[in-house]
Structures are given as C-alpha cells and as structure tokens.
Amino acid sequence: MTIATVSEKVGISADTLRYYERIGLIPTVRRNKSGNREYTEEDCSRVEFIKCMRDSGLSIKRLMEYFYLFQQGDRTIERRRNLLIEHRKNIMEKIEEMKKTVERLDGKISRYGY
C-alpha cells in the first residue's frame, strides 16, 4: 500500500506516518524501485494500533516504550500487559469524568427547556 492509501485508510496524515517512521514507532517501511514507501498489512495494522492508542490519550513516549518492549520478545509480556492495564485504567477514569460532565451539561440544557 502507498503512503496515501494508508493515510486515507487509517485517517492519519502522510506527514504523521513519516514522523512515526522517523522516530521508530513504525519500523522502516520497505520502498519500491522508485523509492516510494510500500506498506504491508502488518505495517498498516501497527499504524491502526498506534492511532487507536494515540486517540485514547497514550503518549508517544509510552507507545515507544511499548514497542521497545515488544521487540524484546516474550520476556516482556508482563511489562507490556501492565502498561496496557495502566492505560485502560486511565481511560476508565476519563470516561467517568466525562459522564459527570455530560450530566452537568444535561442539567444546564434542561434549564433552557430542552
């Protein structure tokens, strides 16, 4: 897949994809004879995971830590699992905060007769 295809499919700009590659979040992408990137399905799956984690608030630093651990193999499974559990906990806390915000907004909106 071309960078444009991956960009459109995943919803990340080509510049962001190049940045992720430059900092090592995405391993060096194979290039064709013309020098254009050719993303594999595996590359695309990784990009989708990165986008999901970034959209959920995981920092680039933590993503880099996760992928560094991933490259170390099975001996880091517990550390990776703990990183993901910690992030899930943070997301759940944010969800609870957002629920309270929605309740407050609903109260304000109801004052306007809606």
Image (cartoon, rainbow, N blue to C red):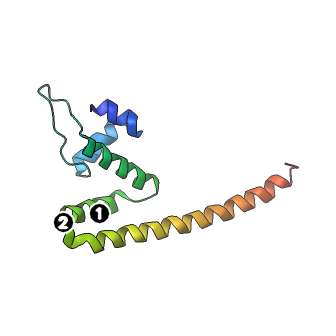
Residue 12 in view: no
Q: Secondary structure at mark 2?
A: loop
Residue occupying the point 21% across, 34% down: 38
Label 2 neighbour load within 10 Å: few <14, some 14-19, many 20+: few
- Specify whether 63 is left or right of 53: left
Give the residue at the far top of this rendering: 34
Find residue 101 and report its horizontal and vertical position in percent: 68, 61
Q: CA distance from mark 2 to mark 1?
A: 11 Å
| Residue 28 picture location, percent across and down | 18, 45
Q: Residue at x 30, y 68 (%)?
A: 80
For residue 20, above or below residue 67? above
Query: Does 68 appear above or below 75?
Result: above
Against 3, is 79 above or below? below
From the image, tell me which residue sits under label 1: 66
Q: State the image coordinates of residue 63 (x, y, percent, origin top left).
A: 32, 59
- Under circle 1, the secondary element is helix
Circle 2 or circle 1, nearest the eye = 2
Residue under label 2: 73
